[in-house]
Image (cartoon, rainbow, N blue to C red):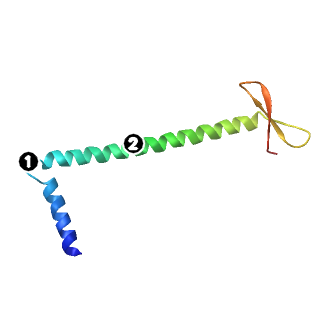
Amino acid sequence: MQLALGMALGCGLMYFFDPQQGNRRRKMAWDRGRAMLRRGWRAADSRRRKVVSDLQGKRQALMHSQATEDGQRMVEDVATRVPIRGSGG
């Protein structure tokens, strides 16, 4: 097991520290790693913005809803101006 691990480590070092191509390979690995992190952060930020937007929309809908006699709330659909029955109390 240790022999295989040592061989793999040696091959990796030879690959990255090759006198002819090593510098290019190191820079490509660095750039790819940074790009992966950047895409991950962007995807996480996009998800965060969607969740915040959805929560703000639900908050606004609840703030502008009206209670009826049976305890349910009427939420008005702004696009069609037709009341929509929603559950909630």
Expressed as whole percent of the image width and height from the top left, the position of residue 23 reads 14, 47
Q: Residue at x 60, y 37 (%)?
A: 53
Residue 27, by quadrant, is top left
Seen as rendered, the residue at the extreme top is: 80
Q: Residue at x 18, y 48 (%)?
A: 25
What number of labels is visible? 2
> Position of 55 compared to 8: left or right?
right
> Position of 58 compared to 7: left or right?
right
The quadrant of the picture occupied by the C terminus is top right
Expressed as whole percent of the image width and height from the top left, the position of residue 79 reads 71, 25
Q: Is residue 26 above or below residue 59?
A: below
Expressed as whole percent of the image width and height from the top left, the position of residue 29 reads 24, 48
Tell me the kind of residue under disc 2: Arg
Seen as rendered, the residue at the extreme left is: 19
> Position of 31 compared to 86: left or right?
left
- On the image, numbered disc 1 is attached to which residue? 20
Expressed as whole percent of the image width and height from the top left, the position of residue 73 reads 82, 39
- On the image, numbered disc 2 is attached to which residue? 39
Q: Which residue is drawn at 15% across and 55% down?
A: 15
Q: Badge 2: how crowded within 10 Å, few (<14), some, or many (20+)?
A: few
Q: Residue at x 48, y 41 (%)?
A: 45
Tell me the kind of residue under disc 1: Gln
Helix, strand or loop status at disc 1: loop
Of labels 2 and 1, earlier in sequence is 1
Q: In this view, does 39 lie above or below 10?
A: above
